[in-house]
Image: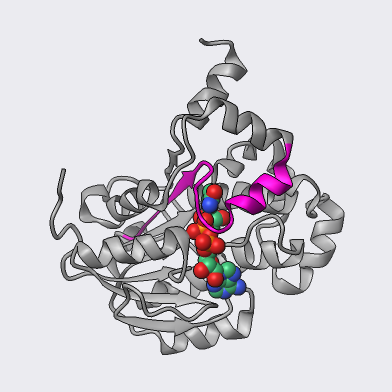
Amino acid sequence: MSVQNLLAGKKIVVTGSASGIGKETARLLTAQGATVLGVDLNKSFDHVEEFYRADLSDGPTIEALVDVLPSGIDGIANVAGLPPTAPAEKVLAVNLVGLKHFTELMIDKLNDGASIVNLASLAGFGWQQSVEAIKASENLGYAGIKDFIAKWSVGNEGGRSYFFSKEALVVWTMQNRWTWRDRGIRMNAVSPGPVDTPILQDFLETLGARAEEDARVMDRPGTPEDIAPVVAFLLSDMTSWLRGTNIHTDGGMASNILCDMHGFS
Ligand SMILES: NC(=O)c1ccc[n+]([C@@H]2O[C@H](COP(=O)([O-])OP(=O)(O)OC[C@H]3O[C@@H](n4cnc5c(N)ncnc54)[C@H](O)[C@@H]3O)[C@@H](O)[C@H]2O)c1
């Protein structure tokens, strides 16, 4: 199957463009006619027209990055993220606080009709169990992260920092279903299951028995090539009526959890 020039003429920012899903997303978007502006902590000029090195865990760095990025942006793929083996404060700073800060500052640089895609995770599936903590995190800034982790028990144990960052991201995506509707700007999320990238090992280490159970029921882990086309689809003009949605891209894992939970075969 081949689709051509799905994103012709679009200027799209991809964070996390140096590795894994972000790198494959940058490759695919470029192949589909987009001009890709890559952002990452690690320098990589692969598949990008321009590369911006930046630490997305740091507020002032994000503000400086937004200053130098051009306007006239048609899409943002927020892919950069840290696994649960990283310190909990960093996980929340990159995966949640930094992502929100960057996106909110970028709105003025977006063209009308732009699309924002957040890389969430199957780890965000159980957000309904964390509603109070998610509400408490709505205005979380960098300075409050340490206290927030202690108060809401979202440290590294059992990968909780990571799970919480993705739960809150799924909810934030829903909350922004209509925030910029008058400008036709939409926000959606993609939630992969386990994907074979450099951080897969970190998940396996953190999740232990849970990861073993996933491996037992799954036919195979995902690949970046399974995820990038879904991001590209959401960035394209084919999806202008998808708003605040979260596309599970996980080989059937989310459906499997729901069927198990409700006693369906
Ligand atoms: N691999 C999986 O199993 C999986 C599953 C579900 C969701 N995800 C999500 O997909 C996204 C991409 O993950 P991946 O598997 O491609 O991992 P990866 O480690 O291959 O890529 C992540 C990229 O983010 C960058 N990054 C990390 N911290 C940064 C910072 N402070 N500033 C700027 N860049 C930073 C890294 O340098 C790296 O290039 C993440 O948000 C991750 O949570 C991954």
> What is the x, y in percent for residue 18?
45, 71
Give the residue displayed 59% in from the left and 56% down from the top.
199
Answer yes or no: is residue 101 visible.
no
Answer yes or no: is residue 142 visible.
yes
Q: Quadrant of residue 111?
A: bottom left
Is residue 31 toward the left or the right of residue 123 in the image?
left
> Between 89 and 71, which is closer to the camera in this rendering?
89
Quadrant assignment for ligand 1: bottom right
Give the residue displayed 58% in from the left and 10% down from the top.
263
> What is the x, y in percent for residue 84?
69, 55
The image's colouring method is one colour
> What is the x, y in percent for residue 44?
43, 78
Eyeballing the image, is 122 above or below 47? Answer: above
> Between 94 and 63, which is closer to the camera in this rendering?
94
Span highlighted in magenta in the image: 185-208
> Between 243 and 33, which is closer to the camera in this rendering?
33
Give the residue displayed 77% in from the left and 45% down from the top.
158
> What is the x, y in percent for residue 189?
45, 50
Q: Quadrant of residue 132?
A: top right
Is residue 205 toward the left or the right of residue 107 in the image?
right
- Residue 113 included in the magenta stretch of the image: no
Give the residue displayed 47% in from the left and 66% down from the top.
19
